[in-house]
């Protein structure tokens, strides 16, 4: 969020400083990078769905802007999603999902192994049907963060590799206090994900964020980059695999109401067991790494942009499972805010 906010502001002509000890290494680092409004349909999340529906276009626009600065684009694969169920009860859940998706106006098609063997290549024989959802996409968050960092540098954005300990403000300026000094600016946006806010930040109480831990496992050796992204409900748990060209795959993701950035052995074992059941080929793929992040979940699971105009600060968070998806859209609010408080 912080990097796309910085991008929007810098492109609007503001001088921007990003204060972050480890930019791009929060939840974004663990994310699979799916922009999958159709597969993410959930009862009660219609507003969020309508927002996510605009996300792919917003990413493509941002990609065009990055091309103007960097003369290269990041890869955005629009492969769609195939959703399957492992056992009878999982298949019932897939069927229920289809009803909710249809209600949201999402078009889906039931596909069977006999008629579409290419979609089931490498998957367990037990999976004989799935639900195909067009239009879902993916990007590689590492590539997106790398391009943003490079683009921001080219746009003259400054980086301060420091943790913000405290903030304050007066009628004309905000101040950021970090261990070795203070930085002053005309306005500030807090985009700290699931982390606690710095001292001096005074939210209205309208919004709160709780961390929901998630883990992804990265493996090498299965190239399904031309196939739809795979999602499967396995014994009631969601499993997914996003394949990049060349055999790099992200499998995920656990979801635990915990704040410790650790990976529990049982959490990893459940994910790998589900993965090996669905994609037996994983048995011989090589393990690259595991990553863990804290999803910033708001009370109503929707993102928010909370403004404290009298203090010249705003707080952008609550992106929960969809922060990569929504970053280019959510960042637009920052420009309006900064324009208003600095005019
Ligand atoms: C396992 C997993 C899989 C996911 N998959 C997807 C996906 O496929 N698609 C999708 O759209 N979303 C996905 N998400 C969700 C997405 O990653 C988050 O919603 C998104 O990354 C949140 O972005 P953010 O910038 O708000 O927070 P973060 O990425 O956590 O960034 C917060 C930043 O703030 C910095 N910071 C915090 N406190 C301070 C401070 N006091 N001073 C200075 N800097 C500070 C941190 O260093 C960090 O860089 C996934 C999340 C997880 C955990």
Image (cartoon, rainbow, N blue to C red):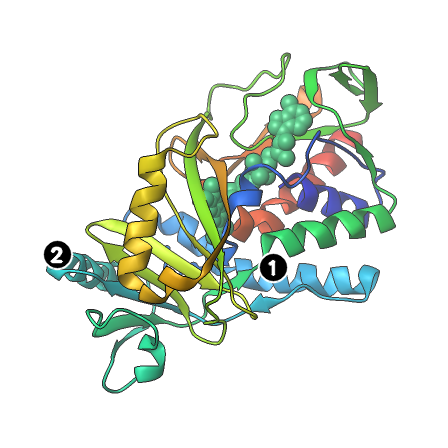
Where residue 197 appears, as percent x and y from the top left, is 58, 21
Q: Which residue does the image show at 43% across and 26% down from the upper left? A: 259
Q: Is residue 20 above or below residue 327?
A: above
Q: Which residue does the image show at 68% across and 59% down from the upper left? A: 62
Residue that mark 2 sits on: 89
At mark 1, the secondary structure is helix
- Asked if the residue at tag 1 contacts the one at tag 2, i.e. Cβ–Cβ closer than 8 Å, the answer is no
Q: Nearer the viewer, residue 175 or 95?
A: 95
Q: Quadrant of the C terminus?
A: top right
Q: Which residue does the image show at 45% across and 30% down from the upper left? A: 262
Q: Quadrant of ligand 1?
A: top right
Q: Which residue does the image show at 62% across and 38% down from the upper left? A: 25
The mark found on residue 279 in the picture is none
Residue 210, by quadrant, is top left
Q: Nearer the viewer, mark 2 or mark 1?
A: 2
Q: Is residue 338 above or below residue 84?
A: above
Where residue 189 appears, as percent x and y from the top left, is 68, 31
Residue that mark 1 sits on: 58
Q: Is residue 116 above or below residue 42?
A: below
Residue 6, by quadrant, is top right
- Relative to 285, 149 lies left or right: right
Distance of label 2 from label 1 (alpha carbons): 37 Å
Which of the two discs, 2 and 1, labels the residue nearer the N terminus? 1
At mark 2, the secondary structure is helix
- Relative to 237, 204 lies left or right: right
């Amino acid at each position: 969020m912080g990097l796309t906010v910085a991008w929007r502001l810098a492109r609007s002509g503001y001088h921007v400083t990003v204060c972050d000890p480890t930019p791009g290494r929060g939840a974004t680092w663990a994310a699979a990078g799916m922009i999958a409004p159709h597969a993410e349909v959930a009862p009660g999340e219609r507003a969020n769905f309508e927002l996510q529906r605009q996300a792919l276009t917003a990413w493509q626009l941002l990609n065009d802007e990055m091309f103007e600065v960097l003369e290269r684009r990041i890869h955005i694969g629009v492969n769609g999603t195939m959703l399957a169920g492992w056992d009878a009860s999982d298949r019932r859940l897939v069927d229920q999902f289809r009803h909710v998706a249809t209600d949201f106006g999402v078009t889906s098609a039931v596909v069977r192994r006999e008629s579409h063997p290419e979609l089931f290549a490498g998957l367990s024989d037990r999976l004989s049907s799935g639900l195909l959802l067009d239009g879902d996409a993916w990007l590689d968050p590492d590539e997106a963060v790398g391009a943003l960092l490079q683009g921001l540098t080219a746009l003259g954005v400054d980086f301060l590799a420091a943790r913000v300990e405290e903030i304050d403000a007066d009628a004309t300026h905000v101040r950021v206090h970090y261990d070795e000094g203070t930085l002053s600016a005309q306005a500030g946006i807090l985009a700290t994900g699931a982390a606690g806010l710095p001292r001096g930040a005074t939210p209205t109480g309208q919004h709160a964020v709780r961390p929901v831990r998630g883990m992804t496992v990265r493996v090498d050796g299965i190239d399904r980059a031309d196939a739809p992204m795979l999602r499967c409900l396995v014994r009631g748990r969601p499993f997914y695999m996003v394949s990049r060209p060349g055999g790099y795959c992200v499998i995920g993701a656990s979801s635990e109401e915990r704040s410790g950035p650790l990976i529990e052995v049982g959490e990893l074992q459940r994910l790998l067991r589900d993965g090996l059941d669905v994609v037996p080929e994983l048995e011989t793929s090589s393990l690259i790494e595991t990553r863990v992040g804290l999803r910033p979940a708001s009370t109503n699971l929707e993102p928010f942009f909370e403004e404290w105009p009298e203090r010249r600060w705003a707080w952008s968070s609550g992106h929960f499972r969809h922060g990569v998806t929504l970053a280019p859209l959510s960042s637009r609010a920052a420009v309006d805010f900064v324009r208003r408080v600095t005019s």
